[in-house]
Structures are given as structure tokens and as C-alpha cells.
Image: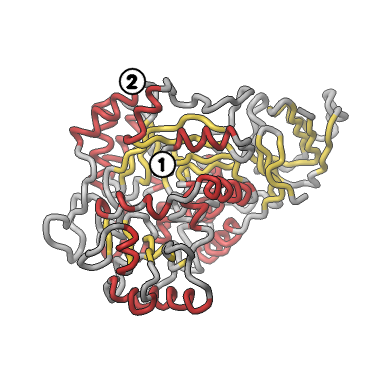
Amino acid sequence: MTALLLTNARLAGGAEPVDVLLDGGRIAAATPTGAGGGHAVVAGDVVDLDGRTVVPGLWDAHTHLTQWALVRHRLDVSWATSAAHAADLVRDRLDHAAPPAGGQPLVGYGFRWATWPDEPTAALLDAVAGDVPVVLLSGDLHSAWASTAGLRFLGLDPHPTGLLREEEWMPASPRIVTVDDDVADALVADAARAAAGRGVVGVVDFEVADNLTAWRRRLAAGWDGLRVRAGVWEQHLDAVLDAGLRDGDRLGDQAGDHPLVTQGPLKVISDGSLNTLTAYCFDPYAGVGGPDAHGVLNVATDHLVPLMAGAHDAGLRCAIHAIGDRANALALDAFEASGARGSVEHAQLLRPADVARFAALGVTASVQPEHAMDDRDVAEELWPGRTARAFPLAELRAAGVRLALGSDAPVAPLDPWVAIASAVTRSRDGREPWHPEQRIDVRAALEASVDGRPLRLAVGGPADLAILDADPLAAGAPSDAGEHDAVEHAAALRTMPVSGTLVAGRWTHRAL
């Protein structure tokens, strides 16, 4: 592999220029520019960064990569303010574009119905789509809304409303998220290139699929994109165990010390979501009665604990989805009882006592700060009096809990700068910060986005880098500034210009 010298660079928060030498897929040296050291002239490429900032490459700790790749080409109904509005968006698409061929459905994504003034029904979609199958995916992926023809496509006709929640939707979802392997792989490669354009070098992929088979196939076809930790679901766990794979083991035939695709954690969804009114909570949802007023527990503790213990004994980490405060408490109980290591995914609503338990148990809080911006209004309506402890990033950080930022793409865009901006400012679209006491500073957010790598760069570590046109640490922390400054800084972080990305010293994005 040819050596590469990045000269006249700056490290995050640093004032003096440095030269960064990459060789053999590693960071070979990082020294002051002009200091010599035997690498001022190398047998390879030299790129003058002209004062640009070099940081460790960014990771997204929670994605559904194939679904994100598909969503990038689907109808966006995320901005619909009512069921009627969403139906109008479907009508407009069908008025201006031919319906999908071969009886395939028109698929949209992103609707959030919990606070709509009207009900999403199959009849409403039928009125605008006729016999064209329509299936709309909710923004949190825990529900879907289908026309009558869409319900027939899913094998769920008749249905009383057309709104499919949790366990009636999840078994049907593969009909929508599954495409031919060659199509899926091409879309995933395209999505990876787009992610590299935002400085991303790696993702944790929790696609609801046989990820072992999918990523071995992509590797055999010459995958050379970003790094991937491929999660495994319970229904595919036996194949991973039979292969003897432990956390971090390489998948497929990959050379080198830093393989691109490795085995990731066991993923379990223990409860639902806020927007579907199924996140499992100690207190009932406002205005909701009946047996599910507190949400839904998808996996009972007496099943979760032995499942996690078995995965732990086999050398796998565990990633447990928990959004409601009661689900989070039970997930922490399960970590304690099973001895497993790993993360709680989302950790959206927490009791103060459970913040301390995260730290005591060494459980990572894998959080998606942009969800706070998506959910702030519905949280105030459905969780009144509780939102001060929703997305409590500052409390988690102060307690010594390891944070890992992600997107849950396609629930939020696969763009770490979006997550960083929301974590730092709790602001979007020019609105005042939401519970600004739970903001963290830029350094903390960036540290939670680089997979544990030191911001000053670690000599000997993998040459996974992002090159930025601005220093994200230079502007300071909005929590120390006025609210107007926080709003402005949110916009600056969201649009952070990335001029280059390298994985193992290889350019995956270059705009220099």
C-alpha cells in the first residue's frame, strides 16, 4: 500500500500545523509540520491540506443500512401534518410519476401519526391511489399504514383500519424491505459513498436480516466501502454461533489487521416506540387507557436474560433496544442478571436512578440525539411532566456513562454531524433549545462519534480519518453561549463541510 503524507493539517482544537503520515493502513506518525523526523519526503503521495482539520473518522453506532439505502429513493412523507396531508403527498406522487411496475407497492416513509388530528385509514389511501398498492412506513419503523391493495400485497387483507402496529407489522415488513440481492447491494454501496461524503468510516448495521450471509456476499463481491459491524438478531443467532464467531471477528476472507466487516452484537427489541405509543413506561401515556396504556413489552425478562447470557457466553456483546423508562430499567436488570456486556439502544426516557446504573454496570448508552428533535412535541403531549429526563445526555455524561451517537437510519439521516448538532444544541429549524440543560459540549459529542479513538490521533491506529474545512472545536460549546448562538451553531454543525475521508489510508471521499 502506498504511503500518504497529509501535510499542513491541524488537529481538532489545535493551532499549530502538523504532518500526518499514513502507511500500511495505519497512522504512522503525526508531527509538527517542518519538524522533519524522516517522513517529510515519502515514497508516495503528498497532499497539502492547507490548514484543514483532521479528526478520527466518524462512526454511526446504530443503522439499518439496507433500509436506509432503500429509503433514499422512496417517497418522503415525514413532513405530513395529518393523515389527509400524507394522502395528498401520495396523490401528488401518483399524478406525476408512473406507479411501480409488476404490482409492487408505492412505498413511502417517515410519517408520525401519534398527534395527527385525523386517523390514518386504508380508505383514505384508497381514495387517492385506487388499485395501486401503497405502504407507508412510520418514521420510527414500528408501524406502517397501507391501502387496501397494499394490505393485500402484505397478505393482511382484511384489516380493520390499515394502520399496522408492532407485532402485526414486523412479520410483514420483509415484504417491503426485501429486494433482489444485486439491487440491495448496489444501493448499499451508493449509500456508503454518500456516508463517506460526511466523514463516515464505519457503521453498526442492525438490518433486520441475515446479516452474516448478506455481508459475506458483499465481501465476496469486493466490498471496499466503509467499515461495518454486522449485528445479529435472535432468529439468525444459531448461524453465528455455529460459525464460532465472537464479537469483532472478521467475516469472510479479509486480509490485514483491521478488517472492514466484523461480527457485531446481538440485537433485541425489548419495547416499542414513543410515536407508536408502545415504548414501555412506568406511567401511562397521557389520555390513553386500556391494557396498553403503559406501552408494550416485546420480550419478557424471563426470555431476555437467558438469551443475553447465552450470547455473552459465546463471546458476543448485546445491544438491547429500550425507549420507555420501564423498558430501560428492565434492560439494565437483564444486563445485571446475565453478566452480558454491551449497550442499550436509544435510552430515550430514564429514571435518575437508572442513569447511575448505566455507569455502575458499564453499559454503553447508544443514543440518537436527532430523535430528540423529531420527538420533542409528541413527547410533551404524551409524556407530560417527564420530558426533563428524555434524552438525558448531560446526566449520562456526568455520571461517567460511555455515549455512542448514531442515527437509527432511516429513522434519522445517516449523518453524524446531524447527531452531533442535536446533542450539542438541542435545537433544529431555528427553534429554541429543548431542555438545554441536557446538552453536551462539542468535544463530548465528537468523542462519542469516533468509536473511542482519541481526537489527537493515535499513532499505530487504523488510518481512518475525516478531513474537515472547519474545526468543530473552534467555536466552543453552545451551552456556554446564548440561545441565539446555540441555534446558529446548530446550523453550522449540521452543514460541516467534509473535504476528504479515508479508510485504512484509502480515499473513500475526496473533494480536495
Say left or right for 83 vs 3.
left
Residue 348 at x, y percent in the picture: 34, 49
Disc 1 secondary structure class: loop
Task: In the rendered view, tell whether residue 20 sits above or below residue 133.
Answer: above
In x, y percent, where is residue 180? 49, 48
Q: Is residue 425 above or below residue 358?
A: below
Q: Where is residue 442 in the image (x, y as percent from the top left)?
A: 55, 48
Q: Kindly tell me whether residue 473 is visible in this rendering.
A: no
**Amino acid under disc 1:** Ala
From this view, report whether residue 401 is shown above or below residue 248.
below
Q: Is residue 223 left or right of residue 3?
A: left
Q: Quadrant of residue 226?
A: top right
> Mark 1, mark 2: which one is toward the viewer?
1
Image point (83%, 26%), residue name: 39
Q: What whole-number distance in Å separates the C-alpha atoms at marks 1 and 2?
A: 23 Å
Q: Name the residue under label 2.
A: 313
- Seen from this angle, which residue lies furthest left? 290
Q: Where is residue 243 in the image (x, y as percent from the top left)?
A: 42, 22
Q: Which of marks 1 and 2 is nearer the N terminus?
A: 1
Between 317 and 241, the one lying in front of the other is 241
Residue 294 picture quarter: bottom left
Question: Toward the viewer: 212 or 466?
Answer: 212
Asked whether 196 or 327 is in front, the reply is 196
Labelled disc at residue 209: 1
